Image (tube, grey):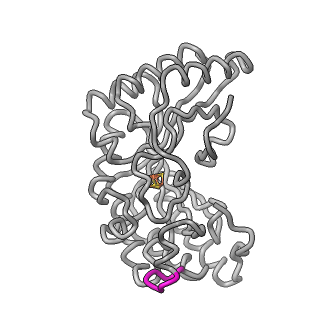
């Protein structure tokens, strides 16, 4: 099976069968993201998808446990097509425990509640969605293409359909000037969405990312490790999302932190204090996207 371009997937999908149902991302405009800038967006044909599924089945039989639908936003597919693919996967790999995908908030909002429920029924168990920031100015600046209100609504509607949600935030996305607003508004958005998982990455700028220009011009100033810890502390002091699993263990982060909201918040804040006191940050050269 030949993948088209580099295939991206969340860290928790490391052992999954990655099935490209689209190539690239239909939006492809976020200024911090270079993932799919090298390819034009298209929806793959059923023939291509059937071919990949048959090939993987011929090698692994029914030993596939997890399946991730790539690339950037599988929910851009018309609902009937997505449901057809989910049915095919369930028939081919009856022992698969879960099927997940990335989902752009705008694509979720374009589907009716009945469509989302049918997609869940067909087998899509969880969607990874980027909120990135709860601050509307930051989202506008990075050309996310949606407002925080729309991301919140998409998250709430997925949950209502029974689809679990894993939401990503990007530490430092608003630069130095926006530390407090980014942290607090992101905490407020998560408190309203109450996702199953929330994860922090830290802004890292690849040379081809459009945001690199703003950083060079000084319009957005990258945070130092201490400031990213300050930002995370502000977030943790404000968020209220009982039962949400919190992870800040991405390779781009200066610190590793995990726990369950709200009960583990005091312990995680204490861990931030310890890291700060010992300057125990991950070295710059060890960080990666
Ligand atoms: S929607 Fe996601 S994949 Fe697409 S450009 Fe934005 S961050 Fe990248």
| Quarter of the image where one finds residue 83 | top left
On the rendered structure, is 205 left or right of 240?
right
Residue 183, position as x, y percentages in the image: 42, 72
Residue 76 falls inside the magenta stretch: no
Residue 221 falls inside the magenta stretch: yes
Residue 262 versus residue 237 in the image, above or below:
above
210, 250: nearer the viewer: 210
Q: Give the mark count.
A: 0
Residue 245, position as x, y percentages in the image: 52, 52
Of helix, strand and loop, which mostly describes the magenta segment? loop
| Quarter of the image where one finds residue 98 | top right
Residue 37, position as x, y percentages in the image: 52, 55
Q: Which residues are magenta?
A: 216-222
Quarter of the picture holding the C terminus: bottom right
Q: Residue at x 71, y 16 (%)?
A: 58
Quarter of the picture holding the N terminus: top right
On the rendered structure, is 192 left or right of 46?
left
In the current view of this chain or complex, which residue is farthest to the top? 91
Q: Residue at x 71, y 82 (%)?
A: 278
Q: Residue at x 58, y 26 (%)?
A: 97
Q: Residue at x 52, y 79 (%)?
A: 230
175, 20: nearer the viewer: 20
Residue 263, position as x, y percentages in the image: 50, 59
Residue 249 versus residue 71 in the image, above or below:
below
42, 25: nearer the viewer: 42
């Amino acid at each position: 099976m030949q993948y088209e371009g580099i295939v991206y997937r969340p860290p928790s999908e490391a052992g999954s069968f990655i099935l490209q149902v689209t190539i690239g991302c239909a939006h492809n405009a976020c200024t911090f993201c270079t993932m799919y800038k090298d390819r034009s967006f298209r929806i793959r044909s059923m023939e291509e998808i059937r071919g990949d599924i048959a090939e993987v089945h011929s090698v692994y039989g029914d030993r596939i446990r997890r399946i991730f639908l790539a690339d950037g936003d599988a929910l851009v597919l018309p609902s009937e097509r997505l449901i057809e693919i989910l049915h095919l996967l369930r028939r081919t790999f009856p022992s698969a425990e879960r099927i997940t995908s990335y989902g752009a908030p705008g694509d979720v909002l374009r589907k009716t509640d009945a469509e989302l429920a049918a997609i869940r029924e067909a087998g899509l168990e969880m969607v990874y969605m980027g909120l990135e920031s709860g601050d509307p100015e930051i989202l506008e600046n990075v050309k996310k293409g949606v407002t925080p209100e729309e991301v919140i609504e998409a998250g709430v509607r997925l949950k209502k359909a029974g689809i679990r949600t894993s939401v990503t935030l990007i530490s430092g996305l608003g630069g130095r000037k926006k530390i407090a607003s980014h942290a607090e508004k992101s905490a407020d958005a998560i408190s309203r969405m109450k996702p199953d998982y929330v994860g922090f990455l830290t802004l890292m700028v690849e040379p081809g990312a459009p945001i690199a220009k703003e950083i060079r011009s000084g319009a957005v100033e990258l945070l130092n490790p201490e400031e990213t810890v300050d930002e995370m502390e502000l977030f943790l002091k404000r968020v209220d999302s009982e039962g949400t699993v919190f992870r800040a263990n991405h390779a781009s982060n200066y610190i590793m932190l995990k726990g369950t909201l709200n009960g583990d918040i005091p312990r995680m804040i204490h861990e931030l204090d310890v890291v700060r006191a010992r300057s125990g940050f991950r070295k710059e050269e060890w960080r990666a996207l």
